[in-house]
Amino acid sequence: MDHFSVSTRETVMEFVSKLPEELSLAEIAREIDLLAGLSTTCPTLKTPSSAKSDAISRLEALADEFTKEGTITVHPSVVLRAERFLRALPDDVLLPEFALDPDGSISLDLIESRNRLFSLSVGQNDRFAYAWLDGTNQGHGVEKFDGQQIPRRIMDGITAIINNGSASFRAA
C-alpha cells in the first residue's frame, strides 16, 4: 500500500471504520472497491451520458450538503451504489428523481403521475428495496444489485411504469 497517499489511507480507514462489524474480509474489499470506483469490479459499465453525469454530480452535491449540515449522514458506499445504478440504466430510460432518506439511504423515484410510480431505496448493502404503484395495482420487493446489471424485476417494474403500464409486472 506504499503507493497510496496519506489522505487516501485516511479516507479508506475512515470508510472501513464505518462498515458494519459483521462484514467478511471479502465484503470489506468489495466496499473499498466501491469507494475507489475501481473498474476491475465493474468492467462492463458504460461511460455515463452527460445527463447521467449531471445527475450523478447533483446526487453527490446533495449528499455532501446534507452530510455537512449534519441533518442526514449518507455513507459514501450508498452514494456509489446509487451512482452505479444510474450508470447501469439503459440510455433510453428517463433518469429518476432522487432524495435522501432520514436513515441515510437514497431514494430513486420514477414518477409518471401520482398514481404511476416506481421507487427504489439504495442503502448500505447490495439489496435494493423497491415499490411500485400503477393505478390500482401495487407491489414491492427486494433485489440484489451487483453494481453492473439492474435486476430483471426492477427493470421490468421501471419499464412498466414508463410504458404506460398496467403491465403484468409482479413482485416476488
Image (spheres, grey):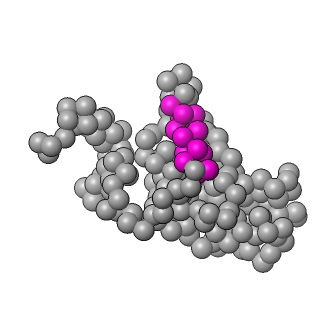
97 or 115, nearer to the observer: 97
Q: Position of residue 5 (x, y in %)?
A: 20, 35
53 or 146, nearer to the observer: 53
Relative to 147, is 51 above or below? above
Report which quarter residue 93 is drawn in. bottom right
Q: In the image, what residue occupies the spot 85% across and 51% down?
A: 114
Q: Does the stretch in magenta take in 57?
A: yes
Relative to 25, is 75 above or below? above
Q: In the image, what residue occupies the spot 36% across and 47% down?
A: 35
Q: Is residue 104 left or right of residue 172?
A: left
Q: In the image, what residue occupies the spot 43% across and 46% down?
A: 77
Q: In the image, what residue occupies the spot 55% across and 28% down?
A: 66
Residue 135 seen in this snapshot: yes
Q: Quadrant of the C terminus?
A: bottom right
Q: Position of residue 49 (x, y in %)?
A: 56, 55
Going by the picture, which residue comes out furthest to the left? 2
Report which quarter residue 157 is drawn in. bottom right
- Magenta span of residues: 51-64
